[in-house]
Image (spheres, coloured by chain):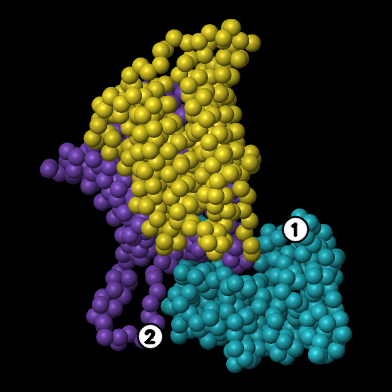
Chain colours: A purple, B yellow, C cyan
C-alpha cells in the first residue's frame, strides 16, 4: 500500500466527486433525479480529448471546453424534458444518457465502440485536488445565495415556489446546466487520467453509481457528497480481490440504504464549523438547558 | 416485397417477446406508479433458470419451461417483499423505489457474474434450426414458437384480468389503491399477484430469449428495450404494452434490415425520447393531474 | 378604484363549468371577501388569478394590466401573492428559511456575483436576512424561527404562510380559507392580524372563508359565488339581507 497507489485511488475518487458534486446540485438541492449523467461526462471527456489531441490545446482550456459543451447539450435536453413530471424526467434522462453512449459507439471519428487510446496524461493529483476544491467552493457559494435557496424551494414544493415568485423552469435549467458542466469536467479529467476513452465507460451503470453516491452521502449535503464519493470509490478499490462481489454488495447496499436510512450519511446536514458547534452544545446539554424549540437543520 | 414480409414477421416475433416482458413493467406501474427496473434482472434469471433446469436437471422442455416461470414468479415476489414493501410502508416517494429497483437490478446481474461467471451459455437444441418455408418467406421455428407461446400467454392474461375476480381487483387497484383498500380489496395480495404475474411472464420471456440467442448476465440490458416499448404503448396500460412492443419489434427489425443493425438500439432510444417529448403518456397510457 | 378586475371570467374542466362568466372588481385598499358553498369555484378563481390554471374565457386585469394566463412567478412579481387552502409551506424547512426564501426578489445579484461572493452580493444578502428577521418579528414568529415548519401548531403555520406571502411586497394578498380549522378564539386573533397588516403593508386583501364572523367582521365588500356564477355582490349588510344568498348559503329560517 504505497503512496502512489493511495494517490491513484484518491484521484479516482476526486474524478467521481466532480460528477457527484454536479449531480448533488441537481438531485440533492433541486430535487431532480437523473439517470443519464454519465452522458454528460462522456460529452465532456470526448470534447476535451478532441481539443488536446486534435488541436493541441492546453489542459485547462480543454477541460473548460468540455464543460461548456456538456452544459450546452444539457440546455437542449432540458428544454425538451424539464417540463415532464418527475418519473418521466427520470426516464428521459436515462434515454438521453444511453442515446449519447450509443451515438458515440457508432461514430468512428472518436474510435467508436473500440475506444480512443493515446490521450495525453495531463491529470495528476494536484490538479484534481485544486479543481475539486474550487468546485466545492463554487457550489457552496451558490447554495448560500438566494439562487441556491430558490433551487431548494423547487425541490421542496414546486407550486409554492411558483407562487413565491420563483421561475421554476429557469432554476431547474440552471441547475441542470451547472451539473452537466461539472460532469463535463469530470469526464475530461477521466479521459486524461485513463489516457483512453471508451463509450461503455459512460453507461447506465455509471450514471446509476453516481446517483447512488449522492443518495448515500445524503441529499442536500455537500459534505455528504464528498464523504460518499471518497468512501464509495476507495472501498471497492481497496477490496480489489473481491472485485466480482463489489457490485453485488453495491446493489444490496443500495436497497438497504433506501429501506433503512434514505436520508443518507449526513441526512441533509452539513459538516461545517457552526454545525459541529451546535452538535456539541446539544450533546453537552442533554438535560434540556437549551431553550425549547432549538431544532432545525443547517441546509441554508 | 418478400423482404418486407420477412422483416415484418421477424419484427412480430421479437415484438411478441418484448410484449411478454413489457406487460410486467406496465402491471407494476399501473398499481404502484413506478418503473420496476429490477424486471430486467428477473428476465435474465429466467433465462438462466431455464438453462439450469434443461441441462443440469435434464428436465423435459415443457416442465423446465414451467419451472423457470414459476421460479421467476416467486423471485419477483421476493424482490417486492424485500426491496419495495418496506418503502411502501413508510410511504416513500416513488424515486426511492426506482433507486431500490436499480440496486436490485445491479445486485441480480452481478451475483450471476460473481457466482456462475460471465461466460455465455447456450441452450441445448430443442427445436431444429431448419426454418420453415412459406413461399418466399422463411420462418424460423424458434421465432414461430416464440410468437405462439407469447400469444397464448397474453391471451391467458387478458382472460385473467377481464374475467376473474382477482383480475377485477387488479383493475380496481390500478385506479386507486386507497379506494380499493377501502372497498375491501386486499391490496397487499393484489400487489403480490401482480408481481408474481410479471415475474412469471418474465421467466417465459427469458427462456424464449435464451433459446433464440444465448444466455449471459447482461440480458437485463436488452430488456430495457421492452421498458421502452411499455413507455411507448403507455405505462400502466396492458394493451398499450402489447401494442407498443409489437410496434417496437417491427420498427427495430425494419431498421436493422434496411439500415444497419448498429442503429437498432439507437432507434429504440430515439423512439423513447420522441415519446417522452411529444406525448409522455404514450399511445394508451394513464394521465394524472395535480390539484392545486 | 379597483386593483383587480375580472371580466367574464370562465373556466371549464371538460364538460364541467367551474367558473362561469364572472365579473368582479376587487377594490384597492380594503379587505374584500369571496364566499359561497363548497365547490362554488372560489379556489378556482384564485388559481386563475395566480396563473395556476389557464382561463377558458375572459380576462383578468391587475392595475389595468392584463395578467390573464401569465406564468405564476410573473404574476407574483407583479404584486399578487396568496396562501393556500391546504397550507403549502416548505414543510421540512425551518420557519426562518421559509420566509428567507420568499425574500429572494428583494435582491437582484446574479449567479456570478454569488459564486464570487462579490460585495454587492454580500450586502444584499445582509439586507434579505434583515428583512426576513423583521417580518418574523412583526408576525410574532421570531422566537420560533428555527423550528421546522411542519412542527408548528396549525394556527402558526397559517401565520407563517401569510408572513411568507408578505415577503414579496405584494399589493394584493389573496387568502384562501385562512381560518380553516380554527376555533373562535384563534379566528378572532386572525381577524386582528389581518386588520393590522392591511394598513401596515398598504395592502388590498381578498379573503375566501366559511367563517362568517370573520368575513362579515372585516370585509367591506363581498362577492357570493354559487355553482361557478356570481350570485350577489355588495357590502356585508347587503349580502346578509339578500334572499338569494340566504337561500343558497347562509341558511333559511326553519
For the point 62% across and 59% down, the residue is B290
Nearer to us in this view, B63 or C244: B63
For the point 76% across and 71% down, the residue is C40
Is C76 situated left or right of B200 in this image?
right
- The secondary structure type at the circle numbered 1 is strand
- Kindly identify which residue carries mark 1: C13
Q: Residue A29's spot in the image, x, y percent?
A: 45, 58
User: Mark 2 or mark 1: which is in front?
Assistant: 1
For the point 57% across and 81% down, the residue is C159
- Kindly identify which residue carries mark 2: A292
Q: Are marks 2 and 1 in contact (CB under 8 Å)?
A: no
Q: Residue C43's spot in the image, x, y percent?
A: 70, 70
Chain letter of the residue beneath label 2 in the structure image:
A
Quadrant containing the N terminus of chain A in the rendered view: top left
Q: Residue B31's spot in the image, x, y percent?
A: 52, 51
Mark 2 to mark 1 CA distance (whole Å): 48 Å
Q: Residue C60's spot in the image, x, y percent?
A: 79, 65
Nearer to us in this view, A250 or A300: A250
At label 2, counting other C-alpha atoms closer than 10 Å, the crowd grade (few under 14, some 14-19, many 20 or more) is few
- The secondary structure type at the circle numbered 2 is loop
- Residue A284 in sight: yes
Amino acid at each position: 500500500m504505497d503512496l502512489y497507489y493511495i494517490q491513484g485511488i484518491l484521484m479516482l475518487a476526486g474524478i467521481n466527486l466532480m460528477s457527484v458534486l454536479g449531480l448533488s446540485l441537481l438531485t440533492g438541492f433541486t430535487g431532480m433525479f437523473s439517470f443519464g449523467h454519465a452522458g454528460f461526462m462522456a460529452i465532456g471527456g470526448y470534447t476535451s480529448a478532441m481539443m488536446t489531441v486534435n488541436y493541441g490545446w492546453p489542459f485547462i482550456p480543454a477541460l473548460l471546453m468540455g464543460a461548456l459543451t456538456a452544459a450546452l447539450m444539457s440546455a437542449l435536453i432540458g428544454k425538451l424534458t424539464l417540463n415532464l413530471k418527475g418519473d418521466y424526467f427520470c426516464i428521459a434522462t436515462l434515454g438521453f444518457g444511453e442515446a449519447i453512449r450509443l451515438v458515440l459507439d457508432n461514430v468512428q471519428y472518436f474510435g467508436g465502440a473500440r475506444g480512443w487510446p493515446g490521450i495525453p496524461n495531463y491529470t495528476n493529483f494536484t490538479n484534481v485536488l485544486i479543481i475539486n476544491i474550487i468546485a466545492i467552493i463554487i457550489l457552496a457559494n451558490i447554495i448560500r445565495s438566494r439562487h441556491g435557496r430558490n433551487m431548494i424551494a423547487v425541490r421542496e414544493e414546486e407550486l409554492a415556489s411558483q407562487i413565491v415568485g420563483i421561475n421554476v423552469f429557469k432554476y431547474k435549467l440552471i441547475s441542470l446546466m451547472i451539473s452537466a458542466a461539472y460532469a463535463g469536467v469530470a469526464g475530461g479529467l477521466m479521459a486524461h487520467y485513463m489516457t483512453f476513452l471508451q463509450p461503455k465507460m459512460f453507461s447506465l451503470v455509471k450514471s446509476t453509481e453516481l446517483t447512488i453516491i449522492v443518495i448515500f452521502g445524503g441529499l442536500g449535503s455537500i459534505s455528504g457528497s464528498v464523504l460518499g464519493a471518497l468512501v464509495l470509490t476507495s472501498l471497492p478499490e481497496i477490496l480489489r480481490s473481491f472485485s466480482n462481489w463489489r457490485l453485488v454488495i453495491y446493489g444490496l447496499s443500495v436497497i438497504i440504504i433506501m429501506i433503512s436510512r434514505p436520508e443518507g450519511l449526513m441526512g441533509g446536514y452539513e459538516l461545517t464549523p457552526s454545525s459541529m458547534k451546535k452538535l456539541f452544545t446539544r450533546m453537552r446539554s442533554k438535560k434540556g438547558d437549551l431553550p425549547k424549540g432549538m431544532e432545525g437543520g443547517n441546509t441554508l | 416485397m418478400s423482404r418486407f414480409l420477412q422483416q415484418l414477421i421477424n419484427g412480430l416475433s421479437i415484438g411478441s417477446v418484448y410484449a411478454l416482458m413489457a406487460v410486467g413493467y406496465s402491471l407494476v406501474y399501473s398499481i404502484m406508479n413506478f418503473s420496476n427496473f429490477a424486471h430486467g434482472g428477473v428476465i435474465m434469471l429466467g433465462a438462466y433458470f431455464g438453462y439450469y433446469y434443461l441441462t443440469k436437471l435434464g428436465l423435459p422442455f415443457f416442465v423446465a419451461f414451467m419451472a423457470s416461470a414459476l421460479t421467476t414468479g416467486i423471485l419477483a415476489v421476493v424482490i417486492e417483499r424485500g426491496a419495495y414493501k418496506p418503502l411502501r410502508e413508510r410511504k416513500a416517494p416513488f424515486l426511492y423505489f426506482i433507486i431500490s429497483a436499480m440496486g436490485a437490478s445491479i445486485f441480480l446481474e452481478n451475483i450471476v457474474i460473481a457466482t456462475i461467471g460471465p461466460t455465455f451459455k447456450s441452450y441445448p437444441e430443442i427445436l431444429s434450426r431448419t426454418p420453415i418455408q412459406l413461399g418466399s418467406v422463411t420462418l424460423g421455428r424458434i421465432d414461430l414458437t416464440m410468437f405462439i407461446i407469447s400469444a397464448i400467454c397474453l391471451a391467458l392474461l387478458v382472460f385473467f384480468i377481464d374475467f376473474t375476480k382477482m383480475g377485477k381487483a387488479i383493475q380496481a387497484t390500478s385506479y386507486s389503491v386507497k379506494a380499493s383498500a377501502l372497498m375491501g380489496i386486499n391490496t397487499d395480495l393484489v400487489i403480490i399477484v401482480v408481481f408474481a404475474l410479471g415475474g412469471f411472464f418474465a421467466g417465459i420471456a427469458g427462456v424464449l430469449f435464451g433459446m433464440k440467442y444465448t444466455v449471459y448476465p447482461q440480458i437485463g440490458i436488452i430488456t430495457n428495450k421492452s421498458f421502452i416499448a411499455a413507455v411507448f404503448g403507455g405505462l400502466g396500460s396492458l394493451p398499450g404494452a402489447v401494442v407498443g412492443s409489437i410496434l417496437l419489434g417491427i420498427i427495430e427489425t425494419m431498421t436493422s434490415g434496411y439500415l444497419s443493425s448498429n442503429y437498432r438500439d439507437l432507434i429504440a432510444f430515439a423512439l423513447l425520447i420522441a415519446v417522452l417529448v411529444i406525448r409522455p403518456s404514450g399511445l394508451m397510457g394513464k394521465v394524472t393531474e395535480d390539484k392545486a | 378604484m379597483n386593483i383587480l378586475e375580472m371580466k367574464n371570467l370562465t373556466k371549464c374542466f371538460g364538460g364541467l363549468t367551474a367558473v362561469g362568466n364572472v365579473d368582479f372588481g376587487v377594490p384597492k385598499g380594503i379587505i374584500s371577501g369571496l364566499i359561497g358553498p363548497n365547490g362554488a369555484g372560489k379556489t378556482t378563481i384564485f388559481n386563475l388569478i395566480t396563473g395556476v390554471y389557464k382561463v377558458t374565457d375572459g380576462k383578468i386585469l391587475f392595475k389595468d394590466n392584463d395578467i390573464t394566463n401569465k406564468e405564476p412567478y410573473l404574476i407574483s412579481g407583479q404584486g399578487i401573492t396568496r396562501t393556500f387552502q391546504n397550507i403549502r409551506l416548505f414543510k421540512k424547512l425551518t420557519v426562518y428559511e421559509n420566509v428567507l426564501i420568499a425574500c429572494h426578489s428583494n435582491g437582484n445579484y446574479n449567479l456570478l456575483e454569488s459564486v464570487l461572493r462579490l460585495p454587492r452580493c454580500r450586502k444584499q444578502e445582509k439586507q434579505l436576512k434583515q428583512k426576513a428577521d423583521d417580518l418574523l418579528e412583526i408576525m410574532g414568529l421570531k422566537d420560533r424561527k428555527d423550528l421546522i415548519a411542519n412542527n408548528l401548531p396549525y394556527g402558526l403555520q397559517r401565520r407563517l404562510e401569510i408572513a411568507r406571502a408578505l415577503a414579496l411586497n405584494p399589493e394584493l394578498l389573496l387568502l384562501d380559507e385562512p381560518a380553516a380549522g380554527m376555533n373562535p378564539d384563534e379566528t378572532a386573533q386572525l381577524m386582528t392580524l389581518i386588520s393590522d397588516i392591511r394598513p401596515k403593508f398598504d395592502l388590498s386583501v381578498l379573503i375566501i372563508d366559511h367563517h362568517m364572523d370573520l368575513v362579515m367582521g372585516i370585509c367591506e365588500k363581498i362577492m357570493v359565488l354559487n355553482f361557478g356564477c356570481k350570485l350577489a355582490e355588495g357590502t356585508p349588510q347587503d349580502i346578509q339581507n339578500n334572499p338569494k344568498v340566504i337561500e343558497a348559503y347562509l341558511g333559511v329560517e326553519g
